[in-house]
Structures are given as C-alpha cells and as structure tokens.
C-alpha cells in the first residue's frame, strides 16, 4: 500500500519596498490633464525618452488622491506585456478606489494603437469586476505630448 503524497505549501509575507517618493502639490486628480501632469512629473525622466515601452500605474483613493506609483512592466521598442493581474496587484494591496495607467511610445508619437485600445478595454472590464475604476489610460509621447484615452471616449 502506497503512502499519500505530501507537498510543501509556502507560507509567505508580502512586503513592499519604497524606492523613492515625490512631493505632489495637487490634492486630487479630477481630470485627464491633472493625471497627465502627475504622470509627467513622476515618470517623464524615466519613460518619456526611454528606448522601450514602460507601463506604469498610479493607485488612487476614493478622493482621487494618489496612494502609490508603480511600474507594471518594461517591454520592447514596440510593445509592453501587460496583463490585468499584474496591473491590479498593487492597487488591490493598497485598497485603491481607482487606477490611472500610462505608458510611453518610444517613437514619440502618443497616438494610441489598436493594442492600446484593447488593453484599455480589458483593464476597464477587470477593474469593474474588482471594484477598482480605471480612471484613465495615458499614452505619453515626446515633448510633453500625451493622449488620454478617457478624453478620447474610450473609457465609457
């Protein structure tokens, strides 16, 4: 008679590590221009002229005040791998009410691609299930240019 198989199940603690901070003047983000301003302030140096796509997120509380900024993924010259699981992981840990996501286009042209529109649709659906609103998805180009998918009507 064989013995039952056993398996070790890990017991873990999730810990976060602060890698920096920024002083932000506005109390809340209530429009796409304010969201873009915050994204530029936080990530402009990191992603505006990066040779690869960086997909980042800002979790917001119920008053649309920023809770935390985090990088979701760093991709290639023309794409970044993004899955709702990774996008919402930190937002869930911070008990976020809403989320702003942003990514750069290394070409400098912030025109949203078909893939940008598709991931926005998927993130909006996932957020609705989780109870975390996708407030905006910004595509950041060069020279301070950006496109808000909310302003384009793609978050309705």
Image (tube, rainbow, N blue to C red):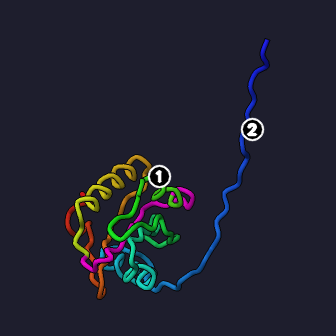
Give residue 78's quadrant in the image.
bottom left
Mark pair 2, 1: CA separation: 25 Å
Residue 12: percent from the left, percent from the top? Answer: 71, 51
The disc placed on residue 8 is 2
Q: Residues within 10 Å of mark 2 (few under 14, many from 20)?
A: few
Q: Is residue 27 depicted above or below 17 in this figure?
A: below
Q: Is residue 90 depicted above or below 17 in this figure?
A: above
Question: Which residue of the protein is positioned furthest toward the left in this rendering?
Answer: 152
Residue 35 visible to an observer of this rendering: yes
Which residue position is annotated with label 1?
Answer: 85
Q: Is 123 in the magenta? A: no
Residue 17: percent from the left, percent from the top? Answer: 65, 70
Q: Nearer the viewer, residue 12 or 107?
A: 107
Q: Secondary structure at mark 1?
A: helix
Residue 62: percent from the left, percent from the top? Answer: 45, 64
The segment highlighted magenta reads 92-109
Q: Secondary structure at mark 2?
A: loop
Residue 60 visible to an observer of this rendering: no
Q: Is 99 in the magenta? A: yes
């Amino acid at each position: 008679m064989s013995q039952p198989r056993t398996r070790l199940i890990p017991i873990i603690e999730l810990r976060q590590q602060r890698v920096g901070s920024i002083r932000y003047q506005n109390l809340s983000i209530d429009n796409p221009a304010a969201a873009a301003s915050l994204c530029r302030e936080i990530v402009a140096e990191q992603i505006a002229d990066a040779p690869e796509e960086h997909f980042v997120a800002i979790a917001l509380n119920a008053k649309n005040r920023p809770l935390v900024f985090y990088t979701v993924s760093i991709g290639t010259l023309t794409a970044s791998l993004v899955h709702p699981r990774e996008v919402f992981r930190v937002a869930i840990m911070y008990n976020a009410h809403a989320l702003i996501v942003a990514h750069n286009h290394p070409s400098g042209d912030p025109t949203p691609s078909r893939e940008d529109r598709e991931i926005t649709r998927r993130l909006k659906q996932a957020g609705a299930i989780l109870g975390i609103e996708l407030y905006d998805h910004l595509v950041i180009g060069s020279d301070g240019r950006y496109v808000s998918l909310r302003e384009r009507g793609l978050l309705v």
